Amino acid sequence: MRIGILLGAGAAIFASAVQAQSTLGTSRAVYVERVANLTDGRMIRAIEPAQGLRSGDRVVLMVEWQATPAPDGLTVASAVPRALAFQRSSKDEVEISVDGGKKWGKLGQMRIRDGNALRLASPEEVTHLRWRVGANQRGNSANRLTYSAIVR
């Protein structure tokens, strides 16, 4: 089961997209957050490459790309694997979708139908993330965005 979740999450991450006219390459990685209690009562947090995931694990997903300059910038989009519940992004400028990427907006503004009423979508209902990266925000080097989630 643990391997199935990891493989499913990996497949969804690799289905992410970097859209630009001149993208050179992308890579993605999944890290799991581990918390250890020290003998003096302090706690330390560390991330390590995910070897297997369990329900409740906190993960950090990293999307990296290398692109040549383009005058109109680029858009980096990532599907949130169904086995994960989105928590937050490394960039406040992230746009979210709660309907599979059909409509985009900000968390705290997107609404979802709940019976006959509309309500604000929660972070756990996010299906896709999108970051717009302007031409002046990148160069010919690797660029990175991350987001955190919890394994359902």
Image: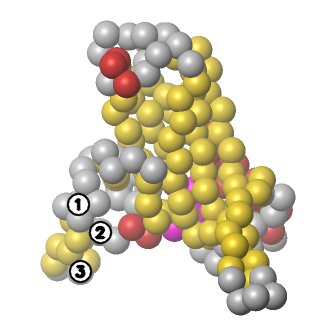
SS majority, magenta: loop
Residue 121 got which mark?
2
Crowd class of label 3 (few under 14; some 14 to 19; many from 20; radius 10 Å): few
Nearest the eye: 86 or 35:
35
Crowd class of label 1 (few under 14; some 14 to 19; many from 20; radius 10 Å): some
Tell me which numbered mark, 1 or 3, is placed earlier along the sequence: 1
Quadrant showing the C terminus: bottom right
**Magenta-drawn segment:** 80-85
Give residue 148's position: percent from left, percent from top: 54, 60
Tell me which numbered mark, 3 or 2, is placed earlier along the sequence: 3
- In space, the residues marked 1 and 3 are separated at their CA atoms by 16 Å
Identify which residue is drawn at 68% across, 83% down.
42
- In space, the residues marked 3 and 2 are separated at their CA atoms by 14 Å
* 111 up-or-down from 145: above or below: below
Q: Are marks 3 and 2 in contact (CB under 8 Å)?
A: no
Identify which residue is drawn at 58% across, 24% down.
142
Q: Magenta span has 76?
A: no
Q: Are marks 2 and 1 in contact (CB under 8 Å)?
A: yes
* 72 up-or-down from 17: above or below: above
Q: Which residue is mark 1?
A: 110
Amino acid on which the number 3 mark rests in the picture:
Gly
Mark yes or no: residue 55 visible: no
Q: Magenta span has 82?
A: yes
Identify which residue is drawn at 55% across, 64% down.
149
Amino acid on which the number 1 mark rests in the picture:
Met
Quadrant showing the N terminus: bottom right
Q: Which residue is mark 3?
A: 115
Instruction: Name the element at disc 3.
Output: loop
Tell me which numbered mark, 2 or 1, is placed earlier along the sequence: 1
Determine the image quadrant of residue 114. Answer: bottom left
- In space, the residues marked 2 and 1 are separated at their CA atoms by 6 Å
Amino acid on which the number 2 mark rests in the picture:
Ala
